[in-house]
Amino acid sequence: MKAAASKYVENKGYLSRLARTDEWAAREAHGNLPGEFTDEAEWLRHMREDYPRFVPFLTRKCGLHFHGRILEIGAGACWFSAALSRLPRVVEIVATDFSPRLLKDFAPRVFELLGARADKITRMPADFHKLPFGDQRFHFVVCSAVLSQAVNMVTVLREARRVLRPGGKLVAIREPVWPRFPFRARTRRPANRAPAPGEKQWYTLEEYGEFFARAGFELEARRVNLSSGLKYYFNEVVNGLTHARYALVATKRTRK
């Protein structure tokens, strides 16, 4: 029996005034791979071997109990949604991205590759600066390496908070965090300049904390270490120094 397919929902006129329409047009016009990838074999390896390790880490090491309705923003090829759909307590996932091409052409390939419960997933183009959902609809909002590309991160975070239920959580992974002693030469973009198409801004952990606080969230940054053996202990020592990998977990508290 063939597994049920994911549903795709058209959403016309979804780009907000903050959307980077130049980046949107470039991505829709070219058949390049999602994200930073230029080699398909490398992209497939990350989809198959690397990225799916995040969900077991989040559930076992961070104690996150994913359940109910989940919204993914900036989903791209939807690997995060695919991995989460396999959890039994997850009822529904809405995967959004500003690129219909990624949602239509690449996400179905990832669903098959990762054995997703695609019938739980609805794909819809959307701009995370202005989400097309009512208040308090989702138990979780998740994202991977997208907040740092926002034109206005606080606006994105406020939208995520709006659609979360009281007590709901925003879980952001793979965001570039500025380490104390960068191993490689990096240049931080001035805060008053908008990111170029596809450009990620490096923020310190303290700056992320300020953004989340301005959006009304309580943020907990949890170290990410997906390694094993001796490399695990090495990463435990240097995480935050030469590199900084964190899961940003924010909770929508109810007002007293």
Image: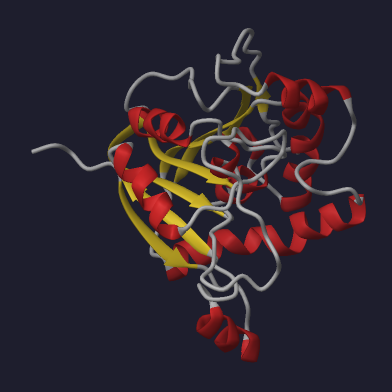
- Residue 45 in the image, given as x and y percentages of width and height: 82, 60
Taking the spot 59% from the left edge, 48% from the top edge, the residue there is 144
Q: Is residue 249 visible?
A: no
Looking at the picture, tell me which residue is in the foreground, 201 or 29: 201
Task: Relative to 178, say whether 40 is above or below.
Answer: above
Task: Relative to 67, say whether 132 is above or below.
Answer: above
Q: Which quadrant of the figure contains the C terminus?
A: top left
Q: Taking 91 as reference, is 73 left or right?
A: right
Residue at the farthest bottom position: 230
Q: Count the marks: how many?
A: 0
Residue at the farthest top position: 13
Looking at the picture, tell me which residue is in the foreground, 185 or 3: 185
Q: Taking 216 as reference, is 96 left or right?
A: right
* Image coloring type: secondary structure
Give residue 182's quadrant in the image: bottom right
Looking at the picture, tell me which residue is in the foreground, 5 or 132: 132
Taking the spot 56% from the left edge, 73% from the top edge, the residue there is 181
Looking at the picture, tell me which residue is in the foreground, 151 or 62: 151
Q: Taking 256 as reference, is 93 left or right?
A: right
- Residue 105 in the image, given as x and y percentages of width and height: 82, 30
- Residue 147 in the image, given as x and y percentages of width and height: 54, 41
Q: Is residue 81 visible?
A: yes
- Residue 228 in the image, given as x and y percentages of width and height: 62, 83
Task: Relative to 143, say whether 42 is above or below.
Answer: below
Give residue 35's quadrant in the image: top right
Q: Which quadrant of the figure contains the N terminus?
A: top right
Taking the spot 77% from the left edge, 58% from the top edge, the residue there is 46
Give residue 186's quadrant in the image: bottom right
